[in-house]
Amino acid sequence: MKPSYIISNEYPPKNIYEKARKLFGDDIVNFDKGTTFTVGNVIYCKIQPPQDLLTHELVHVKQQTEMGYKYWWRLYFKDVNFRYGQELEAYRKQYNWVKLNIKDKNLQNKYLMFFARSLSGKLYGDLKTFQEAYKEISDK
């Protein structure tokens, strides 16, 4: 059963948004330029998210519902390994959606490369190389 959710084009709660901007930087966290936040069962996104991103964010809805969003966000900001693990789960689900719904293999690979660049970057602690993130997301 999919968790219930709400999509809001309002700014995310200020305490979470401002902490994310401070921790990750304005160049990475900018709601007006498309950064999406999930807080509990609310997905904050300036415009309607594409289905693959919605699939990603619904993983966070499930994670936060099971754990409690306040505790989830506290760990997300504090523990880079926790953050990476939560995002890896979401990117895997997002990539699986891409594989099921986009038949063009080259386009599938472009999505995978985009996800791997993100997961191997600053936001997720530079914990993995691009190649490691690529492999982990694709499960190859």
Image: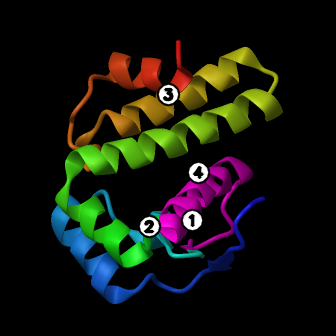
Side (left or right) of 59 relative to 37:
right
User: What residue is disc 4 on?
Assistant: 56
User: What residue is disc 2 on?
Assistant: 67
Marks 1 and 4, the one that precedes in the sequence: 4
Q: In the image, what residue type sits under mark 4?
A: His
Q: CA distance from mark 1 to mark 3?
A: 19 Å
> Do labels 1 and 4 touch, CB within 8 Å?
no
* Numbered range of the magenta stretch: 43-66
Q: Nearer the viewer, residue 69 or 43?
A: 69
Q: Nearer the viewer, residue 1 or 106?
A: 1
User: What residue is disc 1 on?
Assistant: 61
Q: CA distance from mark 1 to mark 4?
A: 9 Å
Disc 2 is placed on an element classified as helix
The residue mark sitting in front, 2 or 3, is: 2
Disc 4 is placed on an element classified as helix
Q: CA distance from mark 2 to mark 3?
A: 23 Å
Q: In the image, what residue type sits under mark 1?
A: Val
Residue drawn at x 26%, y 62% as measured from the top left:
75
